């Protein structure tokens, strides 16, 4: 059944107090709950109360202390008829964490017990109104074997503890009312890195990062990131932490990145553990970003939560924006912006143009887990960023201050957020609300002409139809722009133009010569720009724009145009080589530019992804795109060979550190190897093997191995073997070993992945391992889109096998197949065939069923 946003009704009961008692055991955990319930005056009265369950059997039910059988089971839910105003409901259940392979609710991981409750996992632990608008104060007592579970953690503060023979117990109390999805419990043999933070009003907060013994040396970066997050949120948003204790726990079996449970964040180990020997620069950045993200949820998510799951972007979009701004402030602002736009284009644009397109605030769903998407998260962040751009930073802060003030302690809606920004920042966002209700990436066509002393800018927008939304209204699109004088390579100031009609014309006076237009600077709007601009002007912008993002964009545009034309058969050999040479020339200027740092240089040098190129076409042929892209890579590599190798030699001299200069040098080295691999594979293999051998950090080692993995030859085999032996037993690094091979450019990648699926270290029970092999593969056009259809079949097989084990993770492999309508007919038919095969399976989870049926619907 579909759940619809418009059907929202407040819950008829309030649950002011929740008491839970856990007798912990890996195979059997007994849960006793006592809920005080009282009628909700703000809701329609109901004679019954519905407590959600999922696979639970009640072993005892009491109302006001009296055992009762006067309840019914409605599907998985327990329904009680309650007269009067207020009661106490006590229920006992027994669960088996060790058999919980879905990793939702209470489950066992590596001998420890932990929970994941968002969105609807709490109902797998005990019967409860498992919806985010029911806030309750939780008191928890847990007991278990002391040697098996020496550490017992829960939300809030520990209020008591004790021992009885071999068991021990702890009592925890969380003073902040919260919905059930923010509940967490952890029990296991853990050790902590401890530290403290003093808040702006002098509260002393104890901080702990809990990991398994042996992982402690890899927690320093997480702890430092946490302290930086706490400080930053005080300064940037005026938000202070509100408990005396903040715990982070790292868990190796986890469906997502991490979870913001009140006072007890649970993390995928991938986003906690990092040291230079085992983590890349990218991993370090990701740890910092996710630590920040979860910490920032304490206000945007926990203090103010969501009324219902349709409002998910209220907390996720806003929190992603907050973590992006945090990372921008901690490192390079333009580089972070480019990375975030790249993720948006890689993950969100395809979503928005395919069968699973949905607005950032969806209207209906079957399984909410399917809506933890790049649209809700990343486009959600872009939408709030646009408000910030239109308001200006200061006014935007007034808006968020008002939001936090007005809705603290509430379960709020996206509408509440927009209204707060309107009132606080003094903006009119009436039409802007369309960004919450309309799906699809707007396309803006841009043309600049010159008449007399005037530059005339013509803008036109279209918002493409998406499933269930055939007709769209024009949206307000904030475009930052600048008009450059060619001669002086300067402009007289950036302007903001908001395109809020289907088409518009803007005139700019005082230009004797036609200026060069730089538009959507900083990626001020999440749209596709189609600009009528000469190649020479793009070359000019790539070399001279003072907005780093716009420079990057000009380079990307130059390459995308060339590649799209090439794939479309519109280039003669002559044109292809002339076009390629002019791109190489533009890139040569970037290599030589002394005014840019190496991190930025690395961005400017990177080629558009195959996915992004495919997005520019009605129908894509992955084989042709790959070939064309490799051809350009090879041309650039040979054209700039000398310069690239000089760059490499310079970068090689930079000693290891985690500062921006050294990170930039490492990025360049691997970039050079990648170009060399396309133009001079033998030389590349030699250089890469050398880089691998002398590497004193994971970034260099992984980069070298990545390049070698795509090449033929003995070094490939040797280094893959060395890497495995060197890091055997370190799960996160072995994940890299799987992922490198699954994402490689090697022509036999399909065979490699088949063999890896039978490797003793491969298991479907661990989501990180599954993703490292198969998500990498599904994102590798060489493998996934093999013309034989074998890649599609492998993903089809995986979905069917994984679905009963971990439905949430299985469903995440459907979208790659769901893109069939955008692929050339032969492959499209093979992709569709897999979707139909899955749809016919006897027993499918709600998760996978929803994704497959939406992917096939017309
Ligand atoms: N709220 C978490 C975060 O954004 C993600 C939780 C995902 N849970 C899920 N069932 N999909 O960090
Ligand atoms: Zn989040």
Image (spheres, helix red, strand yellow):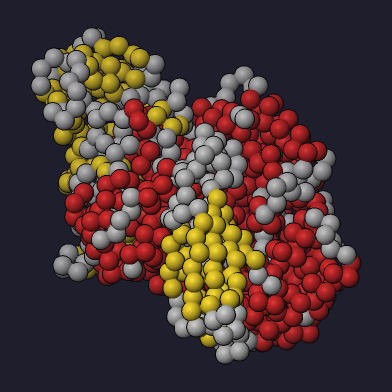
Q: 327 left or right of 626?
A: left
Residue most toward the top?
Answer: 70
Q: How many callouts does the rendering have?
A: 0
x, y percent for residue 716? 79, 62
Which x, y percent locates residue 781?
73, 51
Query: Quarter holding the C terminus?
Result: top right
Give the residue furthest to the front: 452
Instruction: Work out which residue is located at the far right of the displayed protein and give it.
Output: 573
Q: Quadrant of residue 710?
A: bottom right
Which residue is rendered at x = 19% and y = 51% of the image? 406
Whether residue 713 is visible here, answered yes or no, is yes
Q: Quadrant of residue 368?
A: top left
**Figure check: 652 above or below 524:** below
Residue placed most toward the observer, 51 or 196? 51
**Above or below: residue 506 compared with residue 243:** below
Q: At 39% across and 29% down in the image, what residue appears?
A: 4
Is residue 654 in view?
A: no
Relative horizontal placement of residue 714, taking residue 524 as reference (left or right): right
Foreground residue among 424 and 197? 424
The residue sitting at 83% across, 40% down in the picture is 788
Question: Residue 385 or 831: which is nearer the viewer?
Answer: 385
**Is 360 situated left or right of 717 in this image?**
left
Position of 737 with respect to 225 (left or right) is: right
Could you say where residue 849 lies in the image, as x and y percent from the top left? 56, 27
* 628 or 260: nearer the viewer: 628
Please provide percent x and percent y for residue 790: 78, 39
Q: Does residue 169 lie above or below 39 as drawn?
A: below
* Rendered residue at 61%/89% (across/down): 487
- Location of the N terminus (image quadrant): top left
């Amino acid at each position: 059944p579909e759940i619809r946003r418009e059907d929202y009704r407040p819950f008829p009961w309030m649950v002011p107090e929740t008491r839970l008692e856990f007798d912990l055991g890996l195979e059997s955990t007994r849960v006793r709950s006592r809920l005080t319930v009282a009628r909700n005056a703000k809701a329609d009265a109901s004679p019954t109360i519905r407590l959600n369950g999922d696979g639970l059997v009640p072993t005892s039910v009491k109302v006001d202390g009296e055992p009762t059988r006067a309840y019914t089971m409605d599907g998985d839910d327990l329904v009680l008829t309650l007269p009067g105003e207020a009661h106490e409901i006590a229920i006992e259940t027994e669960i088996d964490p060790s058999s919980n392979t879905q990793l939702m609710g209470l489950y066992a991981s590596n001998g420890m017990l932990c929970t994941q409750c968002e969105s609807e996992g709490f109902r797998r632990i005990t019967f409860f109104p498992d919806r985010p608008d029911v806030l309750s104060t939780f008191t928890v007592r847990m007991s278990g074997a002391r040697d098996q579970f020496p550490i017992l953690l829960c939300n809030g503060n520990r209020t008591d503890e004790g021992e009885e023979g071999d068991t021990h117990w702890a009592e925890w109390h969380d003073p902040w009312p919260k919905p059930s999805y923010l509940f967490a419990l952890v029990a296991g043999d853990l050790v902590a890195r401890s530290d403290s933070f003093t808040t702006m009003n002098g509260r002393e907060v104890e901080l702990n990062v809990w990991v398994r013994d042996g992982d402690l040396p890899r927690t320093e970066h997480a702890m430092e990131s946490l302290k930086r997050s706490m400080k930053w949120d005080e300064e940037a948003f005026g938000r202070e932490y509100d408990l005396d204790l903040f715990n982070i726990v790292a868990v190796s079996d986890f469906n997502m990145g991490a979870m913001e449970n009140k006072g007890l964040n649970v993390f995928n180990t991938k986003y906690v553990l990092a040291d230079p020997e085992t983590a890349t620069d990218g991993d370090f950045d990701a740890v910092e970003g996710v630590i920040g993200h979860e910490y920032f949820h304490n206000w945007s998510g926990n203090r103010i939560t969501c009324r219902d799951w349709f409002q998910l972007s209220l907390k996720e979009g806003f929190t992603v924006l907050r973590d992006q701004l945090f990372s921008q402030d901690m490192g390079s602002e333009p580089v972070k912006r480019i990375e975030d736009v790249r993720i948006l284009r890689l993950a969100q644009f395809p979503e928005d143009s395919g069968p699973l397109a949905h607005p950032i605030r969806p209207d209906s769903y079957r399984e909410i887990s399917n809506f933890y998407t790049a649209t809700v998260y990343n486009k959600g962040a872009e939408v709030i960023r646009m408000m910030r751009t239109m308001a200006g930073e200061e006014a935007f802060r007034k808006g968020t201050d008002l939001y936090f003030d007005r809705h603290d302690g509430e379960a709020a809606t996206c509408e509440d957020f927009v209204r707060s920004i309107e009132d606080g920042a003094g903006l009119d966002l009436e039409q802007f609300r369309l960004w919450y209700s309309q799906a699809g990436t707007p396309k803006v066509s841009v043309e600049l002409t010159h008449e007399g002393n005037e530059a005339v800018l013509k803008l036109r927008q279209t918002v493409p139809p998406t499933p269930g939304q055939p007709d769209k209204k024009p949206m307000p699109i904030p475009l930052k722009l600048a008009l450059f004088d060619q001669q002086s390579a300067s402009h007289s100031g950036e302007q903001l133009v908001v395109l809020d009609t289907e088409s518009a014309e803007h005139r700019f006076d005082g230009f004797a010569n036609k200026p060069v237009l730089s538009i959507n600077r900083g990626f001020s709007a999440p749209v596709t720009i189609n600009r009528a601009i000469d190649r020479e002007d793009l070359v000019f912008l790539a070399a001279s724009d003072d907005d780093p993002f716009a420079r990057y964009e000009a380079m990307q545009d130059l390459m995308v145009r060339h590649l799209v034309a090439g794939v479309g058969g519109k280039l003669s050999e002559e044109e292809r080589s002339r076009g390629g040479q002019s791109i190489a020339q533009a890139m040569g200027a970037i290599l030589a530019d002394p005014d840019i740092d190496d991190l930025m240089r690395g961005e400017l040098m990177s080629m558009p992804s195959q996915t992004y190129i495919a997005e520019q076409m009605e129908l894509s042929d992955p084989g042709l795109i790959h070939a064309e892209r490799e051809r350009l890579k090879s041309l650039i590599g040979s054209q700039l060979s000398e310069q690239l190798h000089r760059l490499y030699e310079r970068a090689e001299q930079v000693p290891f550190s985690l500062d921006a200069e050294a990170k930039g040098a490492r990025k360049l080295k691997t970039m050079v190897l990648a170009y060399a691999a396309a133009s001079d594979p033998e030389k590349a293999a030699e250089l890469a093997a050398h880089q691998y051998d002398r590497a004193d950090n994971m970034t260099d080692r992984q980069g070298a191995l990545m390049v070698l993995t795509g090449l033929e030859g003995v070094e490939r085999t040797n280094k893959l073997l060395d890497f495995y032996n060197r890091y055997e037993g370190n799960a996160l690094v072995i994940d890299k070993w799987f992922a490198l091979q699954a994402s490689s450019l090697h022509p036999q990648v399909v065979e490699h992945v088949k063999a890896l699926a039978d490797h003793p270290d491969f298991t479907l029970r661990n989501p990180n391992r599954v993703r490292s092999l198969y998500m990498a593969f599904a994102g590798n056009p060489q493998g996934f889109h093999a013309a034989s259809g074998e890649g599609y079949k492998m993903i089809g097989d995986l979905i069917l096998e994984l679905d009963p084990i971990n439905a949430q993770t299985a469903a995440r492999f459907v979208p790659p197949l769901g893109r069939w309508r955008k692929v050339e007919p032969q492959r499209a038919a093979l992709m569709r065939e897999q979707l139909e095969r899955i749809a016919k399976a006897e027993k499918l989870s709600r998760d996978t069923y929803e994704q497959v049926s939406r992917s096939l619907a017309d």
